[in-house]
Amino acid sequence: MSDGKPYKRVLLKLSGEALGDGNYAINNDILSEIGSDVAEAHATGVEMGIVIGGGNIFRGVAASAKGMDRASSDYMGMLATCINALALQDALEKKGLQTRVQSAIDMAEIAEPYIRRKAIRHLEKGRIVIFAAGSGNPYFTTDTAAALRAMEINADVILKATKVDGIYDKDPAKHDDAVKFETLDYIEVLNKGLQVMDSTAISLCMDNKLPIVTFNLKTNGNIKKVIQGEKIGTTVS
């Protein structure tokens, strides 16, 4: 935990759905708002890596449930994250931020290959690194990729940006009596089956004592607040 102190290096996990609005897979206005929030947070001096999902464009698990080969559908999902990564890179560079996209699947024309030492060097130089194509392996979610990349770059925390202001015992959109947790430990998340990240990602964080802070991305300024150690959202540690 930050204990109120600012984090030095973070891994921000964004869902693909965060970029869309129901009508469009990628909404430029929403993208610009996220860019502004990331720029404001980055101005504090934090080093930031970003992992983005692809669910706004293609969801591998859903396609596999309808009969498509799971590995093929997961690779399609990884390609969707690359589209989102390029869109996010464009939005961040419009805010004056230096960014690099590193892809777990080799596509030299649009992104660097993922190389851990190179990623760390970019971060040390003040660049934002967007990690695309998940972990490069089917059957693993972008949540698990976020946990993996966070540990590889020695991040202090995973910042999981969501549509709600933390973790609840049940869906607050459907239940008025839903109770929000301020803090949780990893075992509680697994035992209660709370939908924070998938169980592989949670177990990975637990084994390596990597904290997760979930918070509402829709509230402007929240990324900066979390990075500066303010107590918002829910902390899993």
Image (cartoon, rainbow, N blue to C red):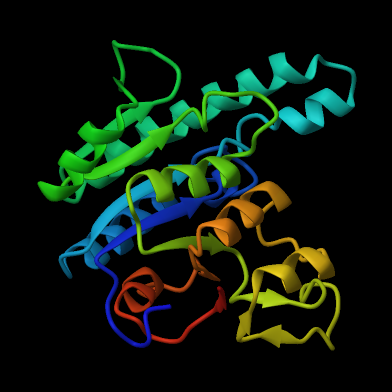
Question: x and y percent of residue 63 in the render?
Answer: 79, 25
Q: Toward which corner of the image does residue 88 lie, by quadrant?
A: top left
Q: Give 136 or 133, whichever is nearer the viewer.
A: 136
203 vs 178, left or right, is: left
Examine the rendered structure and indicate whether residue 48 appears above or below residue 106.
Answer: below
Question: Residue at horizontal 64%, vertical 38%?
Answer: 141
Q: Toward which corner of the image does residue 58 lie, by quadrant?
A: top right
Q: Residue furthest left?
A: 125
Examine the rendered structure and indicate whether residue 185 appears above or below residue 95.
Answer: below
172 vs 58, left or right, is: right
Q: Give 156 or 134, whichever is nearer the viewer.
A: 156
Q: Toward which corner of the image does residue 168 lie, by quadrant?
A: bottom right
Question: Residue at horizontal 86%, vertical 79%?
Answer: 175
Question: Residue at horizontal 89%, vertical 24%?
Answer: 66
Question: x and y percent of residue 177 in the render?
Answer: 84, 88
Examine the rendered structure and indicate whether residue 221 appears above or below residue 94.
Answer: below
220 vs 190, left or right, is: left
Question: x and y percent of residue 40 in the render?
Answer: 23, 66
Q: In the rendered view of the protein, which quadrant contains the C terminus?
A: bottom right
The reply to whether residue 96 is in sight is no
